[in-house]
Amino acid sequence: MGENVTHFRGVVRNGVIVPDAGVTIPEGTEVEFVIRPLEFTPEERAEFAGWEKLGDEAWDMIDQWEKEDGHAAG
């Protein structure tokens, strides 16, 4: 059995997948979704890597500083 597959792009808005402008899909059409990871710049990836390296001790220090400065969350 052959399949006629067409690919469209879109984004999720308020929990609903919204196709790109100009794309119309007939009501009742069966669809399959592929979730792609977000793409980050090398600078963003380096920043994330730096944050991941922070240990629990560093986070405890940050929490303490925030309490001392009166900026504690919650």
Image (cartoon, rainbow, N blue to C red):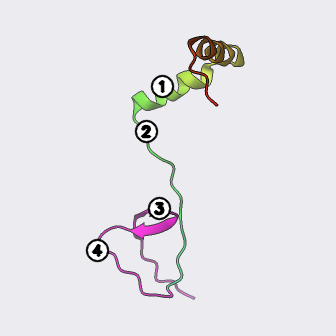
In the image, farthest residue toward the left: 22
- Point out the tag, 4 or 1, that comes first from the N-terminus: 4
Q: Is residue 34 above or below residue 4?
A: above
- Point out the tag, 1 or 2, that comes first from the N-terminus: 2
Mark 2 sits on what residue? Answer: 40
Q: Nearer the viewer, residue 74 or 21?
A: 74
Per the image, label 3 sits on a secondary structure element best described as strand
Q: CA distance from mark 3 to mark 2?
A: 18 Å
Q: CA distance from mark 4 to mark 2?
A: 27 Å
Give the dominant element type of the magenta stretch: helix, strand or loop.
loop
The image quarter in which residue 25 lies: bottom left
In the image, farthest residue toward the front: 70
* Residue type, mark 2 in image: Phe
Q: Please provide percent x and percent y for residue 44.
A: 44, 31
Q: Is residue 19 above or below residue 11?
A: below
In the rendered structure, the answer to whether residue 16 lies left or right of residue 58 reads: left
Please give the name of the residue rendered at 56% of the width and 12% of the height, measured from the top-left corner.
69
Q: Nearer the viewer, residue 6 or 61?
A: 61
Mark 1 sits on what residue? Answer: 47
Badge 4: residue crowd in 10 Å (few <14, some 14–19, many ≥20):
few
For the record, the magenta segment spans 1-28
Please give the name of the residue rendered at 42% of the width and 87% of the height, measured from the top-left corner.
26
Mark 3 sits on what residue? Answer: 12
Mark 4 sits on what residue? Answer: 22
